[in-house]
Image: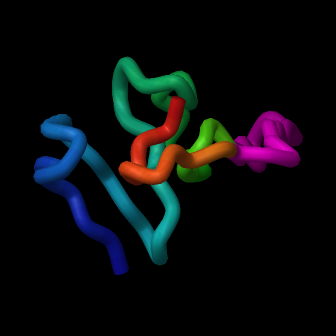
Amino acid sequence: MHFEGNDEVGLAPIRLGLGYSLSQEGDVMGGNPMAFGYSGLGGMTGYADPSEGLAVAVLCNRMKVNRGGTIP
C-alpha cells in the first residue's frame, strides 16, 4: 500500500508507504528507492536506507508550546 501525490498541508509532492515517507528524487533521503523515514512535530526525525546499512534518528527531549498552540 502506498500513496503518491500532493501533500495538501505541506503543499509539496509526497510518497507514503504504510505511514512512512518514501524516497523521491531531490529529497533529504537522496532519491534511493529503498530509503524511508518520517519527520515529526518539533524536529524529531528518523530515516533508514537498508541498501546502505544506514539508519539515522534525531530526537528532542523537550518541546515547549505556547498557550496559543504555536511552537516558539
Whether residue 52 sits left or right of residue 63 in the image: it is: right
Whether residue 31 sits left or right of residue 68 in the image: it is: right
Q: Quadrant of residue 16?
A: bottom left
Whether residue 19 sits left or right of residue 14 in the image: it is: right
Vertical arrangement, residue 31 with respect to residue 61, above or below: above
Q: Is residue 15 visible?
A: yes
Q: Is residue 45 visible?
A: no
Question: Who's the residue at 50% across and 38% down the image?
Answer: 71
Q: Nearer the viewer, residue 69 or 13?
A: 69
Q: Position of residue 51 (x, y in %)?
A: 75, 43
Q: Nearer the viewer, residue 39 or 2?
A: 39
Q: Quadrant of residue 59?
A: top right
Q: Position of residue 12 (x, y in %)?
A: 18, 36
Q: Position of residue 14 (x, y in %)?
A: 27, 47
Whether residue 55 appears in magenta in the rendering, the answer is: yes
Q: Position of residue 44 (x, y in %)?
A: 68, 44
Whether residue 53 sits left or right of residue 48 in the image: it is: right
Q: Nearer the viewer, residue 39 or 43?
A: 43
Whether residue 51 appears in magenta in the rendering, the answer is: yes
Q: Quadrant of the N terminus?
A: bottom left
Q: Residue furthest front?
A: 67
Colour setting = rainbow
Tell me the magenta residue range.
45-63
Question: Who's the residue at 32% across and 53% down the image?
Answer: 15
Q: Nearer the viewer, residue 10 or 52?
A: 10
Question: Who's the residue at 49% across and 43% down the image?
Answer: 33
Q: How many marks?
A: 0
Q: Residue furthest top?
A: 26
Vertical arrangement, residue 60 with respect to residue 17, above or below: above
